[in-house]
Structure formats: C-alpha cells, structure tokens
Amino acid sequence: MTHTIAYTCPEVQTEVRGQLGCITLNRPRALNALSLPMIRALAATLLAWRDDPAVQAVAIRGMGKEGPFGAFCAGGDIRFFHQAMLRGDAELEDFFTEEYALNHLIHHYPKPYIAFMDGIVMGGGMGISQGAKLRIVTPRTKMAMPETNIGLFPDVGGGWFLARCPRHGGEWLALTSEVVGAGDALALQLADCCFDAARLGEAWDVLATQPRFDAAALQAWQQNYLAPAPAATLPLDTIARCFEQPDVLHIVLALEEESGEWAASTVKALRTHAPLMLQVTLEQIRRGAGMSLADELRMERDMVRHCFNTRHLERFMTATDTMEGIRALVIDKDRAPRWQPAQLEDVTPAMVEGFFVSPWPAHAHPLAGLK
C-alpha cells in the first residue's frame, strides 16, 4: 500500500524511484535553509515512507543554484527566528519542537537513510544528516555548527553527536563555529565516506535501481563512487590537550600557551563569540556525552526556550544574547554584537545553570513523547 504524504510544500520535492524514496531540498537561493513548512513536509514524508513496504530506503540531497547537489542545507531560517520573536509568533516554538522531533525520527529511522552532504552542510543541515545510515561528503563539502557565532548553541542534536567526536573535536567545532572540509569531517567521525562530486548524479540514479539496501548492497554501491578526501588538517593532539579543560576560560588560557597561527586564530574566535553562550555550549556537550539522544533533545528544547527568553537573567526578546547575535550578524550586519557579559571572565556558574532548568514539568514537555 502506498501512503499519501499528509503535508507537502514546494521546497521539499519527493518521489519514489524503484524502492528508493528520494527527497530533494529545493530552496537553492537560501542554500536550502529549513523553514517550518519544510520541516513539516520532511517529517510527513518520512513517516509515510516508514510505514510503506514499497519504500526500502530513503536518500536526501539539496538543490544547488545550477541543479541538484552543490549545496545541502545551510541550517535553520535565522531571519524567521528574528521576525517571529519580534512579533511574538508561536511558530517559533513550533519550529524547534518539530525540528528536534524530526532529528530524532531520522536517527531512529528503521530503513536506511542516505544523506548526500555536498556543499554547505551547517546547523540544521547537520540535524537532518548526522542520523543517516550513510553520510556522504565530497571534496567541496563545507561543514560547520556555526550557532555560537550568533549567540545560540549547536542544537539539532549537536550536544549528542558532537559529544561523540574523538579527542574533544566536537567541542572545538561547536565553540569556534569553524568550517571543515571532507577530510576533517571524516576524522571527526561526522561523515562515513567521500564521493567524487562530479559523479553524484550518477550515484543518485544508480542507487534508485538497487534491488536491495542491506549493508552489503550499500557497500558495493558506494565503492564505485569513492574519491580521495582532502587531507585532514586539524591538530587533534592540540585540540585534545586544550579542550579537555574544565571551562571555556581555561581552554582559552591553554590555547594561549600554544605557539602558532592555528592556536591564535582559535583564541580570537573564542574571545569574540558570546561568552555566556560558549560556556552554555560546553556544558551542553559535556552533559550530552552521558545522555540518550531523546533526553539530549529535550534538554536542547529547554535551552532554546531560555535563549529567546532568558528569564533567570531577566533578559527578554532583543535583550537576549541570541537576538543580539542575530541582529549583529544577520540583520544589521554590523558584526559588533554587545554580549552580556562581555568577557569570559565574568560568566558565573549560576548564569549557565539557568539554561538547563526545564520550563516545563516532565509530563507537559513539548518532546515528552520521544523515546
């Protein structure tokens, strides 16, 4: 029986080819940034296909400016966050609740889910690809969790998957908002294989002709398209040494003891991002290391509510670090955010702790149903 998809939108194109459910994110001018209608269409599609015996596997890609591939997904629609907050729109709450539920669905999907992570894969794009059975990057992949740039934290399950990167590499990625290529993505265990970008269309078409999608069949298919990844460049020994410190200030002090340009540029990033949100992010990832994905996503849902309404610090709407970061980097683009507090030295444990207190009783939590 074929399930009709309960919710569709033009920016998420879906078709079943053979036994493969094919999803194309089709918002190329916004680098396929996720809107609430797109999240709803993705969830409805995956739920319909999950229960459809005619669909044996799912593949997802992004539309680039020249055609399929070239960009996967640049994250959530940050301008929407800003506008929705200013007009008191409840859709902002729905956005995060439904996005995190979608992330959970993908991680626990019972059929192979294959993500073609070509071009830009950032923030929310990581949320819809890190749970994939097969995470394919290319030599032109640009991967990041850039949320600390705007006074947010790496959500969409970031506290769970970044906590599982080797040698504190996930903490480095989260705190600095740096962009990495395919080689470093593989070294951080955020990707499984690197394909030749010029052959992605062929790989996509051939995948749709597969009679089976078990591990052996997928392994045989991917062997035909593998390409050498660009070399990994991250100094993981230095990252492990510096990022094992108890807090962000001590990470910065450890980096200042290191010589060379890499350490200096890392210090610069950590000295310019929101001091409070950096410490909140480090706490998130360290807590996430010992949590199930469902519990970590519930924690993120608590955190994101506090980001836009920082009640324990009596900061609301535009007075929050998150809204100030979006203003400075996305809206006004003056790149001069006024963080509160302004430096790492002034962040207190009580400021951080408030982000981890749930605004909801457990039974009424928006993500209470995640298992």
Image (spheres, helix red, strand yellow):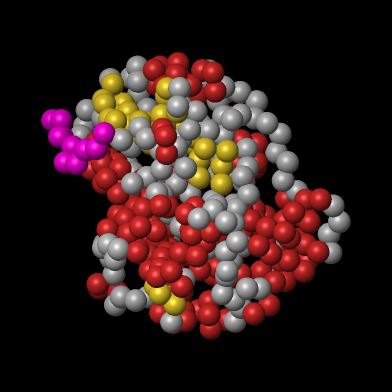
- Magenta: main secondary structure equals loop
Pick the residue in front: 288 or 32.
Answer: 32
Pick the residue in front: 103 or 317.
Answer: 317
Q: Is residue 118 left or right of residue 46?
A: right
Give x and y (percent) for residue 40: 26, 46
* Residue 257, quarter of picture: bottom right
Query: Can the viewer see residue 20?
Result: yes
Magenta-highlighted residues? 1-10
* Residue 149, quarter of picture: bottom right
Q: Is residue 70 above or below residue 330?
A: above
Q: Is residue 330 above or below residue 361?
A: above
Which residue is painted at 50% across and 65% down in the image? Answer: 324
Magenta stretch: includes residue 160: no
Give x and y (percent) for residue 230: 68, 31
Query: Can the viewer see residue 220?
Result: no
* Residue 280, quarter of picture: bottom right
Which residue is painted at 35% across and 32% down in the image? Answer: 26
